[in-house]
Image (cartoon, helix red, strand yellow):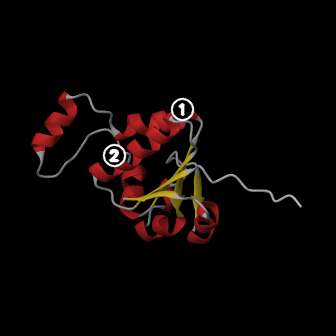
Amino acid sequence: MSHRVSAPDNRVVVFLHSGEYDRVHQGLSIAAAATAAGRRVEVYLFWWALERFLMDRLDEPDFTGREDVSDRFEARGMPTVRALLTHVRESGLGTVAGCTGSLGALGSESKAGGSGIDVWLGWSAILQRTAGVTDRFYL
Protein backbone atom coordinates (compact mmCIF):
# COMPACT_ATOMS: atom_id res chain seq x y z
CA MET A 1 0.00 0.00 0.00
CA SER A 2 1.39 3.36 -1.01
CA HIS A 3 0.86 6.48 1.06
CA ARG A 4 0.97 9.83 -0.63
CA VAL A 5 2.81 12.43 1.32
CA SER A 6 1.63 15.89 0.45
CA ALA A 7 4.27 18.52 -0.07
CA PRO A 8 4.52 21.07 2.72
CA ASP A 9 2.82 24.39 2.05
CA ASN A 10 5.73 26.60 1.08
CA ARG A 11 3.75 29.84 1.03
CA VAL A 12 4.55 32.78 3.26
CA VAL A 13 1.63 34.68 4.76
CA VAL A 14 1.96 38.19 6.16
CA PHE A 15 -0.87 39.69 8.21
CA LEU A 16 -0.54 43.48 8.41
CA HIS A 17 -2.71 45.14 11.04
CA SER A 18 -0.67 48.14 12.16
CA GLY A 19 -0.35 51.02 9.75
CA GLU A 20 2.94 52.21 11.23
CA TYR A 21 5.41 52.65 8.40
CA ASP A 22 8.08 50.47 10.03
CA ARG A 23 5.68 47.53 10.45
CA VAL A 24 4.28 47.78 6.92
CA HIS A 25 7.83 48.07 5.59
CA GLN A 26 8.93 45.03 7.59
CA GLY A 27 5.99 42.97 6.35
CA LEU A 28 6.60 43.85 2.73
CA SER A 29 10.35 43.24 3.19
CA ILE A 30 9.47 39.70 4.31
CA ALA A 31 7.16 39.32 1.31
CA ALA A 32 9.80 40.65 -1.12
CA ALA A 33 12.49 38.34 0.28
CA ALA A 34 10.15 35.36 -0.01
CA THR A 35 9.26 36.10 -3.64
CA ALA A 36 12.95 36.63 -4.44
CA ALA A 37 13.47 33.08 -3.14
CA GLY A 38 10.73 31.82 -5.45
CA ARG A 39 8.05 31.38 -2.78
CA ARG A 40 4.40 32.38 -3.12
CA VAL A 41 3.33 35.15 -0.74
CA GLU A 42 -0.04 36.34 0.46
CA VAL A 43 -0.22 39.70 2.23
CA TYR A 44 -3.43 40.35 4.18
CA LEU A 45 -4.33 43.93 5.10
CA PHE A 46 -6.42 44.81 8.13
CA TRP A 47 -7.40 48.02 9.90
CA TRP A 48 -4.66 50.65 9.89
CA ALA A 49 -2.43 48.88 7.38
CA LEU A 50 -5.42 48.67 5.05
CA GLU A 51 -6.09 52.35 5.64
CA ARG A 52 -2.48 53.21 4.68
CA PHE A 53 -2.95 51.36 1.36
CA LEU A 54 -6.36 52.91 0.69
CA MET A 55 -4.93 56.38 1.33
CA ASP A 56 -1.96 55.55 -0.93
CA ARG A 57 0.59 56.48 1.76
CA LEU A 58 3.29 54.13 0.50
CA ASP A 59 6.10 56.47 -0.55
CA GLU A 60 7.24 58.67 2.31
CA PRO A 61 8.71 57.00 5.39
CA ASP A 62 6.95 58.62 8.34
CA PHE A 63 8.62 57.53 11.54
CA THR A 64 6.79 59.75 14.01
CA GLY A 65 9.22 61.55 16.30
CA ARG A 66 12.22 59.84 14.68
CA GLU A 67 13.43 62.20 12.00
CA ASP A 68 16.93 60.73 12.46
CA VAL A 69 15.64 57.36 11.27
CA SER A 70 13.73 58.95 8.38
CA ASP A 71 16.87 60.80 7.28
CA ARG A 72 19.02 57.67 7.56
CA PHE A 73 16.40 55.61 5.73
CA GLU A 74 16.47 58.01 2.78
CA ALA A 75 20.25 58.55 2.86
CA ARG A 76 20.88 54.81 2.59
CA GLY A 77 18.45 54.52 -0.32
CA MET A 78 16.31 51.94 1.45
CA PRO A 79 13.30 50.90 -0.65
CA THR A 80 9.97 52.48 0.12
CA VAL A 81 6.87 50.44 0.88
CA ARG A 82 5.75 51.07 -2.72
CA ALA A 83 9.06 49.77 -4.12
CA LEU A 84 8.74 46.58 -2.05
CA LEU A 85 5.11 46.16 -3.13
CA THR A 86 6.13 46.62 -6.76
CA HIS A 87 8.77 43.89 -6.39
CA VAL A 88 6.20 41.51 -4.88
CA ARG A 89 3.67 42.25 -7.65
CA GLU A 90 6.18 42.02 -10.49
CA SER A 91 7.41 38.65 -9.24
CA GLY A 92 4.06 37.13 -10.14
CA LEU A 93 4.22 35.27 -6.82
CA GLY A 94 2.42 37.72 -4.56
CA THR A 95 -1.22 38.42 -3.73
CA VAL A 96 -2.46 41.36 -1.69
CA ALA A 97 -5.79 40.79 0.04
CA GLY A 98 -7.93 43.24 1.95
CA CYS A 99 -10.25 42.35 4.81
CA THR A 100 -13.88 43.22 4.09
CA GLY A 101 -14.62 43.63 7.80
CA SER A 102 -11.83 46.17 8.24
CA LEU A 103 -12.93 47.93 5.06
CA GLY A 104 -16.43 48.32 6.50
CA ALA A 105 -15.20 49.38 9.93
CA LEU A 106 -13.12 52.11 8.31
CA GLY A 107 -16.12 53.23 6.21
CA SER A 108 -13.91 53.04 3.13
CA GLU A 109 -16.00 50.86 0.80
CA SER A 110 -15.95 53.59 -1.86
CA LYS A 111 -12.13 53.33 -2.05
CA ALA A 112 -11.99 49.55 -2.59
CA GLY A 113 -12.36 49.60 -6.38
CA GLY A 114 -9.35 51.77 -7.17
CA SER A 115 -7.14 50.47 -4.38
CA GLY A 116 -5.08 47.99 -6.39
CA ILE A 117 -5.82 45.31 -3.80
CA ASP A 118 -6.11 41.97 -5.60
CA VAL A 119 -8.90 40.34 -3.62
CA TRP A 120 -11.33 41.21 -0.82
CA LEU A 121 -12.06 38.52 1.77
CA GLY A 122 -13.65 38.00 5.16
CA TRP A 123 -12.16 35.93 7.98
CA SER A 124 -13.83 32.66 6.95
CA ALA A 125 -12.18 32.78 3.55
CA ILE A 126 -8.87 33.99 5.01
CA LEU A 127 -8.79 31.06 7.42
CA GLN A 128 -9.52 28.62 4.61
CA ARG A 129 -6.85 30.11 2.34
CA THR A 130 -4.14 30.15 5.00
CA ALA A 131 -4.82 26.74 6.57
CA GLY A 132 -1.62 24.71 6.85
CA VAL A 133 0.77 27.60 6.22
CA THR A 134 3.66 27.40 8.65
CA ASP A 135 5.45 30.65 7.79
CA ARG A 136 3.06 33.32 9.07
CA PHE A 137 4.03 36.79 10.20
CA TYR A 138 1.75 39.20 12.06
CA LEU A 139 2.71 42.86 12.21
Viewer-side residue, 22 vs 35:
35
Q: Quadrant of the N terminus?
A: bottom right
Q: Is disc 1 in contact with disc 2, using a CB cutoff of under 8 Å?
A: no
Q: Which mark is residue 42?
A: none
Q: CA distance from mark 1 to mark 2?
A: 17 Å
- Secondary structure at numbered mark 1: helix
Location of mark 2 (residue): 25
Residue 53 locus on image (x, y percent) = 41, 50
Name the side, left or right, on which 106 lies relative to 114.
Answer: left
Q: Give the image location of residue 84, x and y in percent.
A: 41, 37
Q: Is residue 93 above or below residue 52?
A: above
Judged from the image, the secondary structure of the residue bearing numbered disc 2 is helix
**Residue at left 56%, top 36%?**
38
| Circle 2 crowding by C-alpha within 10 Å: few under 14, some 14–19, many from 20 | many
**Quadrant location of residue 78?**
top left
Q: Position of residue 17 (x, y in %)?
A: 39, 62
Residue at the extreme front: 1
Q: Residue furthest right?
A: 1
Quarter of the image for residue 5 reads bottom right
- The quadrant of the rendering that contains the C terminus is bottom left
Please state which amino acid type lies under the numbered disc 2. Answer: His
Q: Residue tagged by mark 1? A: 90
Q: At x 56% / y 70%, what residue is drawn? A: 123
Amino acid on which disc 1 is placed: Glu
- How packed mark 1 is, by other alpha carbons closer than 10 Å (few <14, some 14-19, many 20 or more), is few
Q: Determine the residue positioned at 32% across, 33% down.
A: 79
Precedes in sequence: disc 1 or disc 2: 2
Q: Is residue 137 above or below residue 93?
A: below
| Image position of 6 (left or right of 99) | right
Percent x, y for residue 31?
46, 44
